[in-house]
Amino acid sequence: MITFAIFFFFAAIAVIFAAVVVLHRNPVVGALSLVASFFALAVMYVLLEAPFLAALQVIVYAGAIMVLFLFVIMLLNLQHQEEPRTRPVQQFLGYTTSAAFGLALIYYLAKFGVTKLPEGPFVSDARTVGIRMFEAYIFPFEMVSILLLAAIVGALILSGRTGAIPPPTGENKL
Amino acid sequence: MHGIDWVDVGLSGLKIAIVLGAMLNVTPIMVWVERRGSALIQDRPGPNRVGPFGLFQSFADALKFVLKEDMLPAKANKVLYTIAPMFGLIPALTTIAVVPWGRPFLLPGGRLFEPIIANVNIGILLIFALASMGVYGIVMAGWASANKYSLFGGIRASAQMISYELSLTLAAVSALMVAGSLSLTDVVWRQTGSFVLFNTIKLPAWNICSPAMWMSFIVFFVSAFAETNRLPFDFAEADAELVAGYHTEYSSMKFALFFMSEYMAMATMSALITTLFLGGWDVPWYNEPPTAFGFAVSVLAFLVKVSIILFIFVWVRWTIPRLKYDLLMKLGWKVFLPMAVGNVVLVAWFIAKRWI
């Protein structure tokens, strides 16, 4: 009973703030709303008896990635600007594509979605996740780390002063 | 649903009341220690008129905060401006819930009293998750104030927090590896007792005394200063450069909330340093009995350790000047991060060799 109340409360928070991210014109408000949405999502993990995942969700997404987002938004001092007018064709394509995607998502979730938890004790502590990750999924894990390494090297070359792209000149604006 | 264990609920309520009371009283006490301590270091009397030794100065300060006008800048984002101080306070208040503050003992009814509010098995992750939310209070305040100095404070805070969170977490990892658990209760139990170093000195089994761990203690300790925005790393407010940084536009109780969250975050960090490296509630060279007396002694030991660390926070603030910003980043990324990673490898080697 209490679980249901908590679920619907935080589900509502997650959905509302996710909508704010898309609809609000101010990028800083959008980023902060995304943090709130992530946090509500972490509560879902706790309700699914996976507190380890919940903590990681908050540390990685709400804590680290979104702080970087906010940092960049504030550093560039993005203000909400008038968006360029879109052509009717663009609008039509945008609406139909997203509607089709939404319908496909609902269809597949209804057909294959998980409606109840698997039987038996559900273990998701650090030890189990660690053993799984470094035994069964060691190859994808290493692949992801190589991908991230490539991204880091790419960022270093793009921002480096001796790289292919010349450093930005003058004009120190806030 | 099973019947509710009302004794358990009552004990939990009692524990929450004790910890909350202690945390709320940290701020006035620490303000007094900070002002008198700075006076001691700078060879001047400091506030000594209100009450004995100026002890009631904090209450006079609180009264001043309450009576001040609560101002709202014309161009500020009203919602974010108002909730930012509250947002800063929540992580500072909640993280202490998973820190054990005494030895468990048997109550007369045969029930075990555990002096920790929430004994969860992901304790340290919960702390890092909530602590990483603390930066949003500062960033929100900096942005919502619509002031360039505040904005700079917010930007600096986010960059600094991200940089030092890494070293802080990695330094804590080595303590967790030794304990083999994410629960802070296990971390403390692992540090009870003592060991003999090189067949000569008998040292308490605290992590700081371990030959593999003292380096991560240094990394954690210094990163804790950066995480709590204290001098020499207080770049979010940096009064010589940014007026007052992220809280330039704040006054009255909203400012007081920032003030409170700074000191509460300091207290939580001190409790965490004590738990991870200084043996938590363990009294060195002494085996606490599982009785009310052992509990009292252990709580006292915990409080003494936390107070010493808190005093070092004050001591450092009034002794070491602020770094330059590029130096802060260089120190974080090029000194402490390699140190922390190297220490994790070192501890892993020690564990593999079964030396600890």
Image: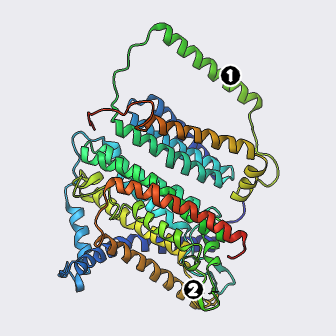
In the rendered image, residue A32, in percent from the top left (x then y), is placed at 44, 41
Badge 2 marks a residue whose secondary structure is helix
* Quarter of the picture holding the C terminus of chain A: top left
For image coordinates 54% across by 16% down, the residue present is A95
Q: Is residue B240 left or right of residue A137?
A: left
Residue under pointer 1: A104
Chain name for mark 1: A
For image coordinates 72% across by 41% down, the residue present is A140
In the rendered image, residue A82, in percent from the top left (x then y), is placed at 34, 21
Relative depth, front residue between B107 and B123: B123
Using the rendered image, report if marks 2 and 1 lie on a common chain.
Answer: no
Dot 2 alpha-carbon crowd within 10 angstroms: few under 14, some 14 to 19, many 20 or more: many
Q: Is residue B256 left or right of residue A63?
A: left
The amino acid on which the numbered mark 2 sits, given as a three-letter code, is Phe
Give the number of the disc on residue B295: 2
In the picture as drawn, the residue positioned furthest to the right comes out as A120
Relative vertical location of residue A80 with respect to residue A93 in this rendering, above or below: below
For image coordinates 63% across by 52% down, the residue present is A2
Q: How far apart are the alpha carbons under marks 2 and 1?
A: 61 Å
In the rendered image, residue B316, in percent from the top left (x then y), is placed at 34, 72
In the rendered image, residue B308, in percent from the top left (x then y), is placed at 41, 80
Q: Is residue B126 left or right of residue A77?
A: right
The amino acid on which the numbered mark 1 sits, given as a three-letter code, is Ala
